[in-house]
Image: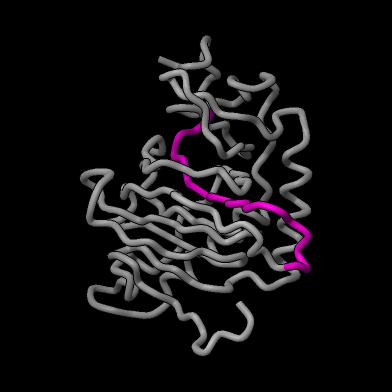
Amino acid sequence: MDGELFPRERTLIAPGAVHVPDWLGPQRQRELLAACREWARPPAGLRTVSTPGGGTMTARQVCLGLHWYPYAYARTAVDGDGAPVKPMPGWLAELGRDAVAAAYAGTGDAGTGDAGVPAGPCEAYDIALINFYDGDARMGMHRDAEERSAAPVVSLSLGDACVFRFGNTASRGHPYRDVELRSGDLFVFGGPSRRAYHGVPRVLPGTAPPTLGLTGRLNITLRVGGLGQPPAPATPDGH
């Protein structure tokens, strides 16, 4: 935020997990927001996600490339209007590759970056999950475990800041670390942290940049599925 005594710096949160503040400039944030608003329109638009236990996620979601639902992927919005999922744009996939390169910049032992993850080219990003949080929304601790690829997960934030809780690979509990993610921030987790539990216990309403024109928080999560094209299931729960 404006007027801070010390600038925020790129931080290694855990092995393979890196926070890069202010990675997206104001213009790129506005461009991404405009794209998210188009993707959120039907068909296969923004929806409320139901869990197998009968609950609902408070953050609403739209998918690109492949459609995520608890806990699998499909080619159509099986828990929404059933329409084919919107394609993953090439420019967004390239942004994912750039994000990984920025997060894992640097050199270290055994040819890896200082995050402990190989710094070479990664696979093509082919899935995007865009979550919209209003002021009361949150996300429980979970793992991104439906992908076959071990490529890092890329997370981009727009709008209101949030408390992002990044944990461990063994359980939803301690140890974990809380990180404030603001509009324009990048968070990448791969390597030994690829299957770490993480969540959003709190959004900080009213903290979005006034010039962005967004009330609430958008999180754009980019993944490599390694799944090919899975068939749409016969039932919404897929189990």
Image-based side of 32 in relation to 194, left or right: right
| Residue 156 location, quadrant | bottom right
Magenta residue check for 189:
no
Q: How is the image coloured?
A: one colour
- x, y (%) of residue 184? 61, 67
Residue 128 shows in this picture: no
Residue at 49%, 47% (x, y): give it. 223
- x, y (%) of residue 183? 61, 65
Image-based side of 179 in relation to 96, left or right: left
Residue at 63%, 64% (x, y): give it. 207
Residue at 75%, 64% (x, y): give it. 212
Residue 75, placed above or below residue 104: above
- x, y (%) of residue 8? 49, 80
| Count of all numbered marks drawn on residues in the image | 0
- x, y (%) of residue 30? 76, 62
Residue 175, placed above or below residue 64: below
Image-based side of 200 in relation to 98, left or right: left
Residue at 63%, 69% (x, y): give it. 24
Magenta residue check for 222:
yes
| Residue 16 location, quadrant | bottom left
Q: Quadrant of the N terminus?
A: bottom right
| Residue 209 location, quadrant | bottom right
- Main secondary structure along the magenta-highlighted residues: loop
Query: Which residue reaches farthest top?
Result: 234
Start and end of the magenta stretch?
A: 210-229
Query: Which residue reaches farthest bottom?
Result: 5
Residue 45, placed above or below residue 135: above
Residue 209 shows in this picture: yes
Image-based side of 220 in relation to 113, left or right: right
